[in-house]
Image (spheres, rainbow, N blue to C red):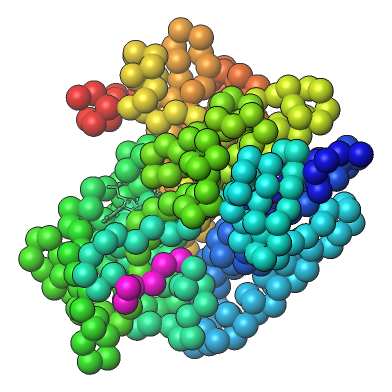
């Protein structure tokens, strides 16, 4: 009999932690999990899932308008925010229940309460003391808010998903995933949206795609302010005034900060037991997700790797293989497809043009910009954009990027092709499905000059 309460104790019942706990328990070991909030974590309760439901809701606005081009005679109906939030909550409550059942059925013991280390094998979980042979930190991340006067008056994505009413005007600060997704949500639901971006929209993405999105958001009436940061938020009658480092003032009903996320590693006694923390407090791990303490591991957004739910789940599976199946496996970060549910959405896999040139020198670029067929009748001035980057020495496709309807669904499939090492010749040999937007990816024949930024 082990001297510990558990063989493995997982801190955090989000997507990564729950998967690790269930899979480890299936190997016959005793697993406990601790959670300070609700079982399910960010993706299920405060991130991907509720966000996507709100994206669906906001899309109807376009759909109602576009229907007129196809002969439907009706006005855009009014929207009831309270109904949407109540329905969204029903779904997140259901998923919370599903996650609890998954853990119960997998014989994982659940403990309510925030977890902190007493020593490398002992945790305080709420009021309890629990010991474990191994401990996995899967505590995720939380919104970061810049330290400016009045920042406490702003909200983050956590609160945006639970607002009591829809603001008429909102300023969203940031230009990353969360900022552009919520800009689309609020604009689609009828708010007057200002997006305040200090450098560029989606700075780390394929620049042409980011530029296309910036233009598309402007065309939808979003006020995209580039090159300014907020310096203060001041409450005024019926709203707030946000001042910027360019000396401008914007009056609004609501300020939302989407300025990145910080790891949940503070106040857990990590450094005290020897777990090294890196940039912004991210837990430092080796290629097998082991921290600087031999029996302590970390996965997901609390580490400095890729902050994506499917990646955290992959890290969990690799860790369980390594620790409990005698199959050491380190996570694979090559060709991880990802999507941004902006409007239009973006799907991307592989390298952007600038990085591809840095790594491979001269590369071949194929790009296509076109008006989606659906909008030939709706009259909506919206464009889809696609780009393929190819290494001419091997003919391998290095990156696929798309902005346009269904981009996330299309790029998921292309992710498999790139993972299999697909060449441009393989793309060319694939017969298109007609008429679709996706067929453009297998019919691009004309090489294009490098984009200006990439050539510099
Ligand atoms: P990101 O790191 O993607 O973007 C942060 C944005 O905030 C950047 O535009 C950054 O500007 C800006 N910013 C940071 N600090 C300040 C400041 N002090 N003043 C003004 N602007 C500032 O963070 P997000 O919060 O959007 O997303 C967090 C993570 O969540 C992402 O890494 C992503 O992996 C994940 N996520 C994934 C989604 C998906 O898969 N669809 C959806 C949502 C989130 P700059 O570029 O100049 O640094």
Is 363 one of the magenta-colored residues?
Answer: no
User: Which residue is outermost to the top?
Assistant: 393
Whether residue 315 is visible, yes or no, is no
At which x and y percent is residue 328? Answer: 73, 22
9 left or right of 174?
right
Q: Residue at x 46, y 86 (%)?
A: 165
Q: Residue at x 39, y 22 (%)?
A: 356
Question: Foreground residue, 180 or 219?
Answer: 180
Whether residue 397 is visible, yes or no, is yes
Tell me how many marks there are: 0
212 left or right of 270?
left
Quadrant of the frame with the N terminus: top right
Question: Foreground residue, 346 or 316?
Answer: 316
At which x and y percent is residue 186? Answer: 42, 72
At which x and y percent is residue 136? Answer: 66, 42
Q: Residue at x 39, y 53 (%)?
A: 260
Question: Foreground residue, 225 or 44?
Answer: 44
Answer with the quarter of the image where residue 221 lies. bottom left
Q: Is residue 204 above or below residue 258?
A: above
Instruction: Identify the magenta region.
Output: 152-157
397 left or right of 222?
right
Q: Residue at x 32, y 39 (%)?
A: 207
User: Which residue is outermost to the left?
Assistant: 247
Quadrant of the frame with the C terminus: top left
């Amino acid at each position: 009999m082990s001297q510990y309460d558990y063989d493995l104790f997982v801190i955090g019942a989000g997507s990564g932690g729950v998967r690790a706990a269930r899979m480890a328990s299936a190997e016959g070991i005793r697993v406990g999990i601790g959670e300070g909030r609700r079982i399910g974590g960010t993706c299920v309760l405060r991130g991907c899932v509720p966000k996507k439901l709100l994206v669906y809701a906001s899309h109807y606005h376009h759909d109602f308008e576009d229907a007129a081009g196809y002969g439907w005679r009706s006005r855009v109906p009014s929207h009831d925010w309270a109904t949407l939030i109540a329905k969204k909550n029903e779904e997140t409550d259901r998923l919370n229940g599903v996650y609890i059942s998954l853990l119960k059925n997998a014989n994982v013991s659940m403990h309510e309460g925030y977890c902190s280390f007493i020593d490398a094998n002992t945790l305080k979980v709420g009021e309890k003391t629990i010991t474990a042979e191994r401990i996995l930190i899967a505590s995720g991340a939380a919104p970061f808010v810049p330290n400016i006067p009045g920042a406490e008056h702003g909200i983050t994505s956590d609160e945006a998903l639970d607002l009591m009413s829809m603001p008429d005007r909102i300023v969203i600060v940031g230009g990353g995933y969360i900022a552009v997704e919520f800009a689309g949500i609020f604009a689609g639901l009828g708010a007057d949206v200002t997006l305040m971006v200090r450098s560029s929209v989606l700075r780390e993405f394929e620049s042409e795609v980011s530029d296309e999105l910036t233009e598309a958001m402007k065309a939808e009436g979003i006020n995209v302010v580039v090159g300014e940061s907020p310096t203060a938020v001041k409450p005024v009658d019926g709203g707030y005034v946000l001042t910027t480092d360019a000396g401008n003032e914007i009056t609004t009903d609501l300020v939302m900060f989407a300025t990145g996320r910080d790891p949940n590693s503070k106040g857990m006694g990590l450094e005290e037991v020897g777990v090294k923390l890196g940039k912004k407090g991210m837990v430092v791990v080796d290629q097998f997700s082991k921290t600087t303490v031999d029996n302590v591991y970390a996965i997901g957004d609390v580490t400095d790797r890729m902050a994506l739910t499917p990646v955290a789940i992959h890290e969990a599976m690799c860790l369980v293989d390594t620790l409990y199946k005698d199959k050491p496996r380190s996570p694979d970060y090559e060709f991880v497809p990802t999507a941004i549910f902006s409007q239009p959405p973006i799907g991307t896999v592989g390298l952007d043009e600038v990085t591809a040139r840095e790594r491979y020198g001269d590369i071949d670029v194929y790009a296509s910009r076109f008006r989606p067929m659906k909008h030939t009748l709706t009259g909506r001035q919206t464009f889809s954009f696609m780009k393929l980057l190819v290494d001419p020495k091997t003919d391998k496709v290095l990156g696929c990027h798309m902005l346009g309807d269904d981009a996330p669904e299309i790029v998921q499939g292309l992710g498999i092709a790139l993972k299999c090492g697909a060449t441009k010749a393989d793309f060319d040999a694939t017969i298109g499905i007609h008429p679709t937007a996706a067929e453009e990816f297998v019919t691009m024949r004309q090489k294009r000059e490098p984009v200006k930024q990439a050539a510099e």
